[in-house]
């Protein structure tokens, strides 16, 4: 192989595809539904139905940064951002195309508008929050890996999650709902969503650690971001 030829990885493309799939599904399928559960001690809790699935995208981000490095995770984040942007554009076009005049479309069009006719603030908040939170998560993990010399994976995963989910949750709800919801209600929802997402990723740590270990062995790589350009707008690895 030529010295200038980029290294090929067996699982990197598959992880990218899985990441984008989870990201799109959690935004398109779960985000519009408010779910409610009654929990012991806590009582009744209302949350977005994507709560159990969207954090999986951050787990992929942890795995990508830990194994392949910040630069390759950055490419995946931009791939996900592009997919979100296209899905938002497609949803806008499909919803606003004049429906055919028949009984089925008379029922279907309002349902389509209810599910995919999100306001510009929710769409913008979702995409901006995802990008900011993902880059913050990857940056913290990469820097902590260098600082700990590759030790304490659990601390790096949890530490990056605490920062990334704080940025993501805070940015999304402030852009989407500030000035619409009462401030006390907005703050309560931000705190609830943030705690649930963070706890969920912490619970999933054993799975994350096993996947990281498998990929490091299978790919023969354990990347340290020494000398990495952390500019989030750079596409080149």
Image (spheres, rainbow, N blue to C red):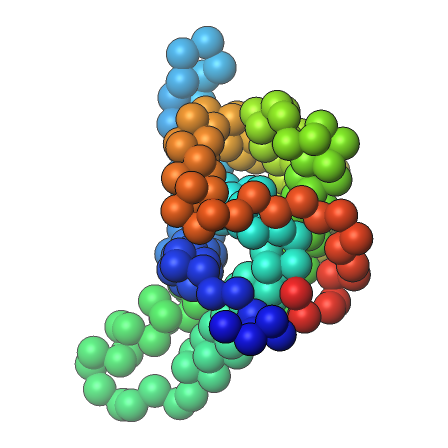
Asked if residue 153 is positioned above or below residue 95 in the image, the reply reads above
User: Residue drawn 26% across and 80% down?
Assistant: 105
Horizontal arrangement in the rendering, residue 186 relative to residue 119 (left or right): right
Q: Position of residue 81 (x, y in %)?
A: 58, 66
Q: Quadrant of residue 207?
A: top left
Residue at image point 66% right, 65% down: 237
Residue 129, percent from left and from top: 66, 53
- Against 39, is 211 above or below? below
For this rendering, which residue is in front, 134 or 97?
Answer: 134
Residue 56 appears left or right of 110: right
Taking the spot 28% from the left edge, 73% from the top edge, the residue there is 108
The picture quadrant where one finds residue 2 is bottom right
Nearer to us in this view, 45 or 4: 4
Against 131, residue 213 (above or below) is: above
Q: Please state the total of marks drawn on the protein image.
A: 0
Taking the spot 39% from the left edge, 39% from the top edge, the residue there is 214
Would you say residue 23 is visible in this rendering? Answer: yes
Residue found at the very far left of the displayed protein: 103
Q: Is residue 190 visible?
A: no
| Residue 113 x, y percent position in the rendering | 42, 70
Relative horizontal placement of residue 156, taking residue 83 as reference (left or right): right
Residue 196, position as x, y percentages in the image: 52, 29
Q: Nearer the viewer, residue 74 or 184?
A: 74
Residue at the limit of the structure toward the top, as seen here: 41
């Amino acid at each position: 192989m030529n010295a200038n030829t980029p290294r090929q990885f067996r699982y990197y493309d598959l992880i990218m595809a899985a990441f984008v799939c989870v990201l799109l599904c959690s935004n398109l399928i779960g985000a519009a539904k408010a779910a409610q559960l009654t929990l012991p001690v806590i009582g009744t809790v209302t949350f977005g139905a994507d709560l159990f699935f969207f954090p999986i995208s951050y787990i992929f981000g942890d795995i990508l940064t830990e194994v392949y490095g910040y630069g390759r995770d950055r490419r995946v984040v931009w791939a996900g951002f592009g997919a979100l942007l296209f899905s938002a554009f497609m949803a806008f076009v499909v919803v606003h195309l004049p429906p055919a005049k028949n009984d089925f479309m008379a029922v279907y069009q309002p349902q389509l508008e209810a599910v995919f006719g999100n306001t510009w603030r929710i769409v913008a908040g979702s995409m901006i929050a995802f990008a900011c939170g993902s880059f913050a998560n990857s940056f913290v993990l990469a820097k902590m890996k260098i600082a700990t010399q590759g030790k304490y994976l659990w601390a790096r995963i949890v530490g990056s999650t605490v920062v990334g989910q704080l940025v993501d949750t805070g940015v999304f709800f402030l852009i989407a709902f500030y000035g619409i919801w009462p401030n006390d209600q907005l703050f309560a929802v931000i705190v609830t969503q943030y705690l649930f997402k963070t706890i969920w990723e912490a619970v999933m740590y054993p799975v994350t650690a096993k996947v990281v270990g498998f990929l490091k062995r299978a790919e023969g790589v354990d990347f340290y971001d020494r000398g990495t350009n952390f500019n989030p707008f750079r596409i080149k690895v």
